[in-house]
Image (tube, rainbow, N blue to C red):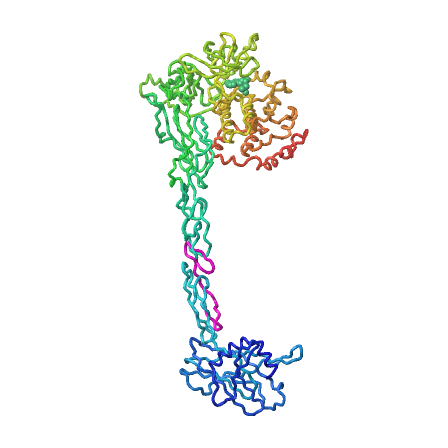
């Protein structure tokens, strides 16, 4: 009947319908009251809304009760009651006296049984927060109030609720009775059951969670249930087991193609390269066929395979050491733990003529070691002479052991040269003579014609004497008493001299003593002899010191019967005539390829001497890095000098046609060969004066040999030679300043030239100082300028060049220093990894002041470009 009231009920009609129905079932009116009315109204859709109403505002002393049925407590510890009601304010009701109230009371009583309600405990007096509000149109609208009260603590099985009206105008629309629970939940991969909070609102209920399927406990998972039904303080956790990953709060199996090898809350990983998993929940991926996983490889690592064979295996051989160098395999198998094994076989022709191979001698020394080499080179010492060695270099990695495939090897065969070494021994000695004999350690390549014994006083190393003998023994007389002499011997064969025997020291007896021969066995007590390696004896004999130069030729060069020489073709032009290639066919000896220098007809006697002078020089040398003289033809025409044939010709033109085609180590191997030859020459006391790449010859195995001896030839023949102030004709760009300035040629000036040869080699035959004029070269050297490092040249090699180009000749290294330095580089090629491009700053910091801008050629920026 109240228009305003009906407006409110209309807007809450659905809710009211729901709860009013519930109230009808649960509540009954207390018999003593009868002043609450159960009233059903209809909402707009004509649905009934059940309410309990009371409105006896005009009459005093109201005490009207409405009571619920018995409500079972269930698990509740703390019970809440939510009331929805309307309550009219007394001012809105016309004519009411002071009897009108604006509150009602809520009571409860707890019992174990459903029995008649007596007045229980009062919970609260309930008042409306709002009774009316004003609408825009000025209407007053009755508002629905919602009040929540806590009841209890309730400990018995159930309870009643009751509402006491003391004279207000109330419509009770709904009563909701509830308790709070922490709902069952999943947290940190653990399941927590539904939990009722403690009665005491200040204490929390500790609940242990159980890990979900395929998860395992890390720290005991716990949650605390708070009084308001909220989960608080999550502690501990579960993690997904191997083969499972967390997804939507669960642990799900890894999909095929994925794996998870450890428990933890991370995702399954995709199978690494060359592996796969076909099933769900894989804990590891299995390697594809031909791929492997080493014991220590983590499952996350790609499967790998053994490496391919090392590449570009090359050997470098000198008298004492054999170097093998190779490049890493093209296919590392996907691993970086590559090591190399060098396996050695010695293959010699057996008695039957068939080649027999067996493992190499156990005392062959490998530096650093034969197996498990980390670098890409090895030095081999103590090998036998005149033997065929085959080296197999194998690359292995962490899975080589697991593979079943055949090993991939790089192979190289090395034939060690026979050097015809002799070993001396003393037979007897007196105060003035020493008797020596010697034996062949290795047979020389051809028949021995005679022996040359050289000796000198140990204290007086500069002068020496020599004697020749056909027998393998000699008695040296005319010696000083109580003096130590140094002896060595070499054999002369049809092919030239063998190497000298190691130096042999032996002392004469004191004056007045008898010879060992005379004193039978006791005399040997006071003479002592000692074999020691020693070098530095000056044994080169300048042919110009011979009164008749033909004598020198006869002494040092073997005459060849011209019918033994077959000329194939002309390979070049020398100053004295053509240079041809051909074969030397000495009966009973193996054919050898030779180069034949001819003296063209119509020559003057002086030219003939000049021409043959070179032969008498080369004939004195016996070194694997010096061009070998086979012999001369002087007794018939044309006059010829026959030397070993060098397949690749002169080094400068050879490098120019092979620009950039060699490994640095191969270039260093060539430089080493040249240094070996130069060390030999300087030990012999020979100064070359024209060391340049054009005067180095290269054989088919890239062995470099020093050639072009006899500076006289250079004067006329060498287009690079120029006249100097002192009148000499000199190859300016290759020559040390003191030799240009005042003709001081020495092994130290040869070292300067060697530095230029290094530069030529590292720049593949570039012209030193490019197109600068000779005069500018001299000036810029004087002012401190030095050639910059060729592009791609290891810094350490350029430093060596700079060392060779020290202004003070005494500060330059000796050839044997250079040799041991290069040997160290070859054994440790990583020292050559820093290339010049990385090191321009170093060069410029050292030589900055010296670099001149003369003629725009040598500006710093030019060089950098
Ligand atoms: O660069 P090449 O081919 O090497 O041209 C010159 C030419 O003769 C004039 O000297 C070549 N030549 C000189 N001696 C020899 C040798 N022993 N073996 C092969 N070629 C040689 C040189």
Residue 525 vs residue 414, the one in the foreground: 414
Residue that sits furthest to the left in the current view: 521
Provide residue 167's location: percent of width, then percent of height: 56, 88
Provide residue 586's location: percent of width, then percent of height: 43, 12
Q: Main secondary structure of the magenta part?
A: strand
Question: Which range is magenta?
Answer: 224-251
How many numbered circles are shown? 0
Eyeballing the image, is 443 above or below 863?
Answer: above
Asked if residue 153 lies left or right of residue 727, the reply is left
Query: Looking at the rendering, in which quadrant would you find the N terminus?
Result: bottom right
Eyeballing the image, is 5 above or below 239?
Answer: below
Residue 744 vs residue 85, the one in the foreground: 85
Residue that sits furthest to the front in the current view: 46
Residue that sits furthest to the bottom in the current view: 60
- In the rendered image, residue 506 lying in the magenta stretch gets the answer no
Does the image show residue 362?
yes
């Amino acid at each position: 009947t109240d228009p305003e009231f009906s407006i409110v009920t209309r807007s809450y009609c659905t809710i009211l319908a729901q709860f009013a129905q519930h109230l009808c079932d649960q509540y009954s009116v207390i018999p003593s009251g009868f002043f609450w009315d159960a009233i059903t109204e209809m909402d707009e859709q004509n649905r009934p809304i059940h309410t309990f109403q009371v409105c006896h505002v005009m009459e005093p002393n109201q005490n009207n009760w409405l009571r619920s049925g018995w409500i079972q407590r269930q698990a509740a510890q703390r019970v809440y009651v939510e009331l929805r009601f309307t309550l009219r304010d007394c001012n809105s009701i016309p004519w009411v006296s002071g009897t009108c109230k604006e509150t009602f009371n809520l009571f409860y009583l707890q019992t174990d049984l459903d029995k008649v309600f007596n007045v229980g405990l009062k919970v609260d007096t309930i008042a409306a927060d709002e009774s009316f509000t004003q609408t825009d149109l000025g209407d007053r609208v009755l508002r629905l109030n919602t009040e929540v009260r806590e009841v209890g603590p309730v400990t018995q099985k159930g309870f009643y609720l009751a509402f006491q009206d003391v004279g207000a105008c109330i419509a009770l629309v709904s009563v909701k009775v509830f308790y709070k629970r922490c709902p069952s939940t999943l947290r940190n991969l653990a399941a927590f059951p539904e939990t009722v909070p403690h009665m005491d609102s200040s204490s929390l209920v500790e609940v242990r969670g159980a890990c979900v399927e395929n998860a395992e406990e890390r720290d005991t998972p716990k949650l605390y249930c708070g009084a308001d039904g909220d989960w608080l303080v999550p502690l501990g956790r579960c993690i997904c087991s191997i083969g499972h990953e967390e997804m939507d709060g669960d642990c799900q199996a890894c999909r095929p193609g994925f794996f998870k090898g450890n428990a933890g809350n991370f995702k399954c990983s995709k199978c690494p390269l060359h592996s796969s998993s076909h099933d769900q929940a894989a804990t590891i991926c299995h390697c594809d066929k031909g791929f492997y996983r080493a014991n220590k490889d983590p499952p996350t690592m790609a499967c790998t395979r053994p490496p391919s064979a090392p590449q570009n295996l090359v050997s470098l051989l000198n008298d004492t050491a054999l170097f093998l160098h190779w490049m890493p395999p093209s296919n590392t198998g996907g691993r970086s733990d590559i090591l190399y094994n060098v396996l050695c076989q010695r293959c010699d022709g057996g008695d039957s003529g068939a080649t027999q191979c067996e493992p190499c001698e156990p005392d062959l020394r490998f530096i650093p070691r034969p197996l498990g080499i980390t670098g890409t080179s090895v030095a081999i010492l103590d090998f036998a002479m005149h033997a065929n060695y085959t080296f197999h270099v194998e690359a292995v990695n962490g899975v080589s052991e697991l593979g079943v495939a055949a090993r991939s090897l790089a192979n190289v065969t090395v034939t060690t040269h026979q050097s015809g070494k002799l070993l001396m021994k003393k037979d007897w000695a007196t105060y003035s003579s020493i008797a020596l004999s010697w034996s062949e350690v290795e047979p020389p390549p051809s028949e021995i014609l005679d022996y040359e014994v050289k000796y000198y006083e140990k204290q007086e190393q500069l002068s020496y004497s020599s004697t020749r003998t056909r027998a393998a023994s000699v008695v040296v007389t005319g010696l000083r008493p109580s003096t130590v002499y140094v002896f060595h011997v070499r054999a002369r064969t049809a092919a030239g001299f063998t190497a000298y025997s190691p130096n042999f020291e032996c002392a004469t007896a004191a004056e007045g003593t008898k010879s060992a021969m005379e004193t039978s066995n006791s005399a040997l007590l006071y003479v002592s002899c000692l074999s020691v390696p020693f070098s530095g004896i000056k044994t080169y004999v300048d042919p110009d010191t011979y009164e008749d130069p033909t004598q020198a030729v006869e002494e040092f060069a073997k005459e060849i019967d011209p019918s033994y020489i077959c000329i194939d073709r002309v390979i070049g032009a020398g100053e004295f005539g053509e240079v041809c290639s051909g074969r030397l066919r000495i009966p009973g000896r193996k054919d050898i390829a030779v180069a034949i220098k001819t003296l063209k007809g119509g020559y003057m006697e002086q030219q003939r001497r000049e021409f043959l002078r070179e032969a008498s020089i080369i004939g004195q040398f016996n070194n694997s890095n010096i061009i070998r003289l086979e012999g001369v033809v002087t007794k018939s025409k044309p006059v010829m000098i026959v030397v070993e044939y060098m397949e690749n010709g002169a080094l400068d033109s050879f490098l120019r046609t092979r620009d950039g085609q060699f490994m640095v180590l191969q270039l260093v191997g060539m430089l080493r060969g040249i240094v070996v030859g130069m060390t030999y020459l300087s030990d012999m006391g020979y100064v070359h004066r024209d060391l340049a790449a054009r005067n180095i010859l290269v054989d088919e195995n890239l062995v470099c040999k020093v050639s072009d001896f006899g500076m006289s030839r250079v004067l006329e023949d060498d287009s690079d030679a120029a006249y100097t102030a002192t009148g000499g004709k000199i190859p300016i760009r290759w020559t040390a300043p003191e030799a240009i300035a005042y003709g001081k040629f020495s092994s130290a000036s040869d070292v300067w030239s060697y530095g230029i040869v290094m530069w030529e080699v590292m720049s593949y035959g570039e012209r030193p100082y490019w197109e600068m004029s000779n005069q500018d070269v001299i000036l810029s050297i004087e002012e401190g300028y030095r050639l910059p490092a060729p592009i791609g040249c290891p810094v350490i090699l350029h430093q060596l060049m700079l060392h060779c180009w020290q202004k003070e000749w005494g500060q330059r290294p000796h050839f044997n220093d250079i040799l041991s330095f290069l040997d160290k580089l070859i054994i440790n090629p990583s020292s050559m990894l820093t290339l010049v491009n990385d090191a321009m700053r170093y060069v410029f910091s050292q030589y900055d002041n010296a670099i001149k801008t003369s003629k725009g050629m040598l500006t710093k920026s030019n060089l950098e470009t």
